Every structure is written in C-alpha cells, then in structure tokens.
Amino acid sequence: MTSPPQANGHAHHIAPLDASLLTIQRAETLKPVPEPGTYTFGDIKTDHMLVMTYDPVVGWSAPQIKPYGPLALDPASNCFQYCTNVFEGMKAILNPDGTPCMFRPVDNMRRLQSSGARMALPPFDADALLTCITKLVLTEARWIPAVPGHALYIRPTLIGTKPSIKVGASDHATLYTIVTPVGPYFPTTTGGVSLLAVGEHVRSWPGGTGGFKLGLNYSPGFVPQQAAAVLGYDQVLWLIGEDKQITEAGAMNFFAVVERDDGGLNIVTPPLDGTILPGITRDSTLVLLHAHAADTSRKILDLPVDKPVYIEERILSVNELAEWAKAGNLLECFGTGTAVLVVAVERIGDLVGADVKQVRDIEMKAGRGLGPVGQALWDKLLALKEGRDEFAGWSVKCE
Amino acid sequence: MTSPPQANGHAHHIAPLDASLLTIQRAETLKPVPEPGTYTFGDIKTDHMLVMTYDPVVGWSAPQIKPYGPLALDPASNCFQYCTNVFEGMKAILNPDGTPCMFRPVDNMRRLQSSGARMALPPFDADALLTCITKLVLTEARWIPAVPGHALYIRPTLIGTKPSIKVGASDHATLYTIVTPVGPYFPTTTGGVSLLAVGEHVRSWPGGTGGFKLGLNYSPGFVPQQAAAVLGYDQVLWLIGEDKQITEAGAMNFFAVVERDDGGLNIVTPPLDGTILPGITRDSTLVLLHAHAADTSRKILDLPVDKPVYIEERILSVNELAEWAKAGNLLECFGTGTAVLVVAVERIGDLVGADVKQVRDIEMKAGRGLGPVGQALWDKLLALKEGRDEFAGWSVKCE
C-alpha cells in the first residue's frame, strides 16, 4: 500500500486491493449449463465475472462480481496499443465430497504479480485477489463439470488501460477474471499431439519475455502454428539457436524420457533460463519426480520399482532427441500445462534439409499415447487436482 | 475478396472492406480545440473516430465515422488475451494553401497489412482504408494545428476480437482509427534525447517480430525505459548480442554520422534484417541521402558541397560508436520516426563495467543538438511534410 506524502504535506491515500469490499451483483436470468462433451475449450461464457480497476489517483476500486459482459475501454488504451496484457490459467475441480478445489492457486497469484511487474502494471495484493477469485468460483459453482477430465477453467487477466497513445507504462489497469467449463484441451487427438520443430520463428530469447506469462508471448506463434497445421502437425516445438535448443512445445513445457543403459530413466526438461515459462504443472512434475526418486520404496508415482528416475534440468536440443530415437532410447516425450495437465507427444517433425517440406519424424519407443512416466504423472496429478490424493497441500478448497 | 464455395454449392459472400459504404454520424456537440503547446503527445481526444469490424461469416462491416467513444469488447477477446494488436503512426499537416496532407500514406497502409498478416488477422483492402482515413482527417480538419512542428497524429489500429480464450488466431477483428493533435514528441528536451545502451533486455531477435509494427514490440521496453530514466537517460538504445549491435533507439530508427579522412561523411544505419522496424521516415531519410549523393550539384539536402555523403546500411555496434567518439570522428547521431521526424541523440550512456552504474557517455562532436546532417534532413523532411517542397509525390493531399 502506497501513501506518498503530497505537496501540501497531507498523505494521499492510494487504496489497496481490498477483498472485504467485494460486492456481488447477480445476473437476473441464469444461462443453461451445457452438457460436458458438447463444447470446445474456451467457448462457453458463464453468468458472472470478477472486475476491479486501478486509477493512479484513487488506487484499486472495490472488487465486483457482476453479470458477464463486455468491457468498455477507450480506443487509445495502452492494452490495445502496446499490449500491456498478462494472464493466468487455473482450474477449479470438484473433490470427492463435491467441494470445488484449486491447485496451487497462490503460485498463480505470485506469477500474475511477476508478469504484471514485467509489464510495469500497477501492483495488487495477491491474497485479496485470490479471495475474490474463490468467491467467483463459488458463485459459478454450478458451472463446474462433475465429469473426470473436465474442470472450470479460470482466467485472471490484468490489462493496462491508460487512455493515451504515448508510448510508455500504463498507470491505469483493469484486473478481471472470467471462468469457463472445459473438457480435454486437444479433443480431436486421441493419443497425443504431434509437434513440428521450428527454428525459423523464435518464440523467446535471452533478454526477452519468455519467462513471464504475458499475452504477447502467444500471438507471434499463430502464423507458425498455422504453417505447422498445413504440414499435418498439431503444435510447434519452439527452438532457439543454431544448435536447435528446445524451449517450449506449443504453449506447454516439454519433457523427454530417455532409457539409460543401467535400466534407469533420464527425464530431461529445459531449465528456467528466462526463455521458458515457469509452469506450475512443470514445477509440480519436477517436485513429484524428485520425491519419487528420493523415496526408497519408490511409491510416489506408479512406475516400475526397477526403473529409477534421474531428473535433469538442462539445455536440450532436438538433435539429441533424434540421436536418442535412432539409438532406440527415446522412450517418450510429453508436454505439461494447466490446460492439458500432461499430454503425450506422438511424434516430432524435424527439419532435416533446407527445404521446409523435408521433415523427418522422430518417433517414441513407447508409441503414440502417454508412456509410463507421462501416464504415472497424469494419474498422480489428476488425483491431486481432483482431491482424491494429497501432496504438500497443493489442492486448496474453495470456501 | 474471398468467395469460397459452400457445402450446398452456393458461393458464400464475404464482404470486402468497402469505402463506398462509409457512413458519418456527427457528434451532437463538438469539443473545444485546445491551443497548440498546451498538451503533451497523445492526450487529446477529438470528436470522431473511424471504426469497422470483421466477422468470419459476413466479412467487413460498413465503415463508420462516429463520435469518439469506448470500444465494448468481450473480456475473452483475443486482443486482451494474446495481444493480436497492430497499429500505424501517420500525420496530417496543413500545406501552405491550408489543405491537409499526409506523407507516404500508402506505405503505412501496406505496413499495416503486413503487420496484420504477421498476427494472422483478417486481411483488408488498403485503398479502401486509406479512403476512409482521408475522410476522417477531413471530418476532423479543425483539429489540425496550424503551427509549425505540430500535426494531427493519426493512429490506425487493428485488433483481434475473437471472443475465446482458446490459444489461436483471431477470426474476428476491429479496425479503427483515432486522431490527436500533437506538438513535438519530446517537449522537455531542448536539444535532443539521451540514450542508455541496454543489452540486458533485448527488444527483438532474429526470427522474432521486430520487423513488424506490432503493439507487442513496445511494452517489454517499459521497465528498461523506467530504469534508464532513473539513471538520467530519456530513452533506451536497444542492443543485441555480445558484440552490442544496435537495433533501435527508443521507438525510433538509429543513424550515426562519421567523419571520413577524405572530408566526406559516412552515414551508417542498421539494415532491415527483421530485428528493426522498416520505418517510413528511415526509408525517406535513406532515399533523400542517396538522391543527394547521386546529385552532382549536391542540392537535395542543405549540406556543405565539400562534404559528400556515403550511405551504409550495415550492422553497427555501440563499441564502434565509442571508438569513433574517442578518435574524434563521431559527428552526430540521430533517431527517425513519424512521431519525432528527426531527433538529435545528445549522448549515449555505454555500460563499461559489470556494475550497471558504471556508465560512460559517448558524446557527439557536433554537440547536443542536431548536427549538420540531422538538421538538413529535418529541414527537408518537414518542408516535404508541410507541402512547401515536393519529392517523389510523397506528400498526398486529403481530398
């Protein structure tokens, strides 16, 4: 909370974000909730949304839950002109007793703060926002699908609304949250996703913004994504540099599992060097793998006891994947993210000539669905998210 | 214009952008026009704006000039979530007979098309948009300041409005144009701008989007810009790579002028390698310099006849600038852009140690204001923009 002294000597009160001021204006008529399985990711609008605004003179407004509807913004707003837009992705899932739960929500709030600071947006109290989001989830509880693999996806969004085209930071902001019921992210893919390795377009770079969850990290990928689709691939595997280092897969973090000569499994993922998103599912995956590796009975994850795992956060290139596949050691690759949880990488199209159409597929020894490690992580993470299992207090009840 | 056949065999009509459908709804009361010199860049809202929308089923709506006011957009809109936002900067200036003129407006329209395509936004007819923008300028003609160095700044903006948080291209769009009367971009700087050379944050990258005019290229610079301001510099000089290659200066293209041993001047600017904006003022500067160099009487620009100019588009590093300055050969540096036209670089803070506060200033031999080349370009470009001079049909009357 900022209270700078003013020229007249009086302290000027800049209001912090205060969850106790939350008001709820309920929609007069409620929409019908569609049957799970009848919608694709992100298309359904629920009855209510959460909105608060920041003004540099008065500070944060009282948070409002109100009927879902359009935002009215000056066309000169910073968010349109210079893309000061950051967001989070979270899910609310019903636990076995029917209580909505969120997964590591404090981590999402911290990352939203970090993303907002990178865009020079006004700061906010993370606890207060989480309290308000929890209230929104409870208000929209009837929208949470009671179907395995489904969830109420939560999208907190912070945008700069300074109404001036002068190039510079936005000292006005709107912080809002919308929710939408979702099923599996890739409904048309039974086994997993195919990836085209792309180095011509670069998603992020050292000194860039790939380590933050900014809206602007995503749209530069749309044209390469469309080009990959034309060649028959679902998503792009983003590379950087002449040695074809892997950064991310589509909008997911990337893992490869390699069989060792001693019967163990090396699980490799790129490090948090500022070019990749510090994914919360990525972190959960690493924590679970380390816990499993450290557990002498190896019972954290449902993996064969004679397959010890070794975790490596290190630079990883698509050339290495090709070599491992050639040697018959590339067991599986998978992507992680809030929207997908864990998704198998079916195959990776690797450009082997100067002509973009000369693509050779890297195949996985475990086949096209989830391999043993991806499946064990899926099972464990879903159980934790659905509140059927417990680990480190990650699942938090909405109450 | 796209007319794909439909499943039933009938051609489906996707409406192109059609300037003949433009309607004008005038504001009921007009705002007072403020005195030039009383406002800073980008703050004033005029009476009207130009708006048209794209829907994938019907195509482009009829363009509308209507009272300036907020845009109402779904909070799930692609522009908020994934930053599919592109824009242009143009100026309308009164020529000596009082007719509003624009400078190379077709080039702005082409660049907006190119930027929109990079963001996978719906295509539009550039001639039709320019016709509508011309009509907006004429509608807002009373806002064009009749003061030298002032102009009506024009901001065409194209944003993705698909109302879904699914990561992917926007098949809905809003294309709008606002205008604002402006004075000099850097009103607090009498001579020019000071630059802090920054390599820690990188504005653009090979395979990135620095070669397009995307909103998302600007906001990552706000935090470094604030840090530069704390150290007493107006703007950032963006570097890339260990050899400290210069890309852009703030939001401008960068030029250095070096004295040669033979009495001539080398004018050096980074090449269009995809990491810098293809600035229209940059291009005009290069065309004028080449025309001057090729003109045996050397009368295109007001430069000493005994100072022939040699133009180099090549990779340029801040280390080279430091060496030239040390040798006493760095005559001047300047930035170019629509908002600033030509602005002197007063000094460049170059990081010489590991500690960010160890900054050594590179000074210009010509001093802190515009040197002879920058001044000659300023004079020529302003005369062309104000319609007092003519070159290659660059100044286009609004009629």
Image (cartoon, coloured by chain):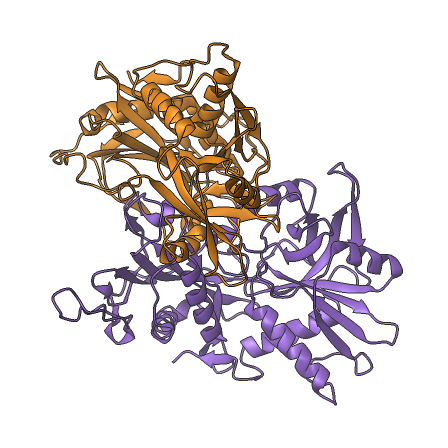
Chain colours: A orange, B purple
Pinpoint residue B23: horizontal percent, then vertical percent. 24, 70
- Give the quarter of the image for residue A94: top left
Which residue is painted at 25% across and 60% down in the image? B56
| Quarter of the view holding residue B144 | bottom left
Give the camera-side residue of A28 and B202.
Answer: B202
Placement of B128 over or under A57, stated as above or below: below
Residue closer to the observer: B392 or A298? A298
Q: Judge by depth and name the residue closer to the eye, A174 or B99.
A: A174
In the displayed structure, would residue B7 be above or below residue A371? below
Number of numbered discs visible in the structure rendering: 0
Q: Is residue B275 above or below residue A60?
A: below
Query: Left or right of A123: which side holds A180?
Result: left
| Quadrant holding the N terminus of chain B | bottom left
Along the line of sight, the residue nearer the viewer: A120 or A88: A88
Examine the rendering and report whether any part of residue A162 can be seen. Answer: no
> At x 38% / y 72%, what residue is drawn?
B126
- Residue A326, how many percent across, how many down? 52, 43
**Could you tell me residue A170's position as x and y percent?**
48, 43
Report the residue that reaches farthest toward the top. Answer: A297
